[in-house]
Image: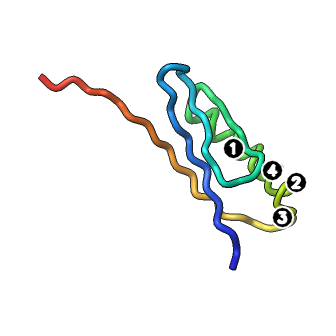
């Protein structure tokens, strides 16, 4: 059975940055926007999978999730 992989973009309101949580060994991402985060994920995840999981010349599904909590004012 193939390993399933995920990358989650989490918002840190204090640092005002999106950071990664992932089960791809070696993958660490910080970005100021979700678009930048996704661009970095598409660039870095294949490198980390090749280097650390020895995956080459195949397509690997990666679940991409974005998670943030927002406070809204209810009047």
Mark 4: few/some/many CA within 10 Å (<14, 14-19, 20+): some
* Dots 3, 2 in contact, CB < 8 A: no
Question: Does 33 sit left or right of 44 as displayed?
Answer: left
Q: Quadrant of residue 52?
A: bottom right
The image position of residue 61, as x and y in percent, is 65, 63
Q: Which residue, given by chain and number where applicable, does mark 2 sit on?
A: 51
In the rendered image, the quadrant that contains the N terminus is bottom right
Disc 3 versus disc 4: distance between alpha carbons? 9 Å
Question: Does 3 sit left or right of 8 as displayed?
Answer: right
Disc 1 versus disc 3: distance between alpha carbons? 16 Å
Question: Does 19 sit left or right of 13 as displayed?
Answer: right
Q: Which residue, given by chain and number where applicable, does mark 4 sit on?
A: 48
* Dots 1, 4 in contact, CB < 8 A: no
The image position of residue 69, as x and y in percent, is 38, 34
As helix, strand or loop, the secondary structure at mark 4 comes to helix
Q: Is 27 rendered above or below residue 16? A: below
Camera-near label (1 vs 4) is 4
* First reached walking from the N terminus: tag 2 or tag 1: 1
Residue at figure coordinates x 74%, y 49% from the top left = 45
Mark 3: few/some/many CA within 10 Å (<14, 14-19, 20+): some
Q: Which residue, given by chain and number where applicable, does mark 1 sit on?
A: 41
* First reached walking from the N terminus: tag 1 or tag 4: 1
Residue at figure coordinates x 77%, y 44% from the top left = 44
* Dots 3, 4 in contact, CB < 8 A: no
Q: Residue furthest left?
A: 75
* Dots 2, 1 in contact, CB < 8 A: no
* Dots 4, 2 in contact, CB < 8 A: yes
Q: Which residue, given by chain and number where applicable, does mark 3 sit on?
A: 55
């Amino acid at each position: 059975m193939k390993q399933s992989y995920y990358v989650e973009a989490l918002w840190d309101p204090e640092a005002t940055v999106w950071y990664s949580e992932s089960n791809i060994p070696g993958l660490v991402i910080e970005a100021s926007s979700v678009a930048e985060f996704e661009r970095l994920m598409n660039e870095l995840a294949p490198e980390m999978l090749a280097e650390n999981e020895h995956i080459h010349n195949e397509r690997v599904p990666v679940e991409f999730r974005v998670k943030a909590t927002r406070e809204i004012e209810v009047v």
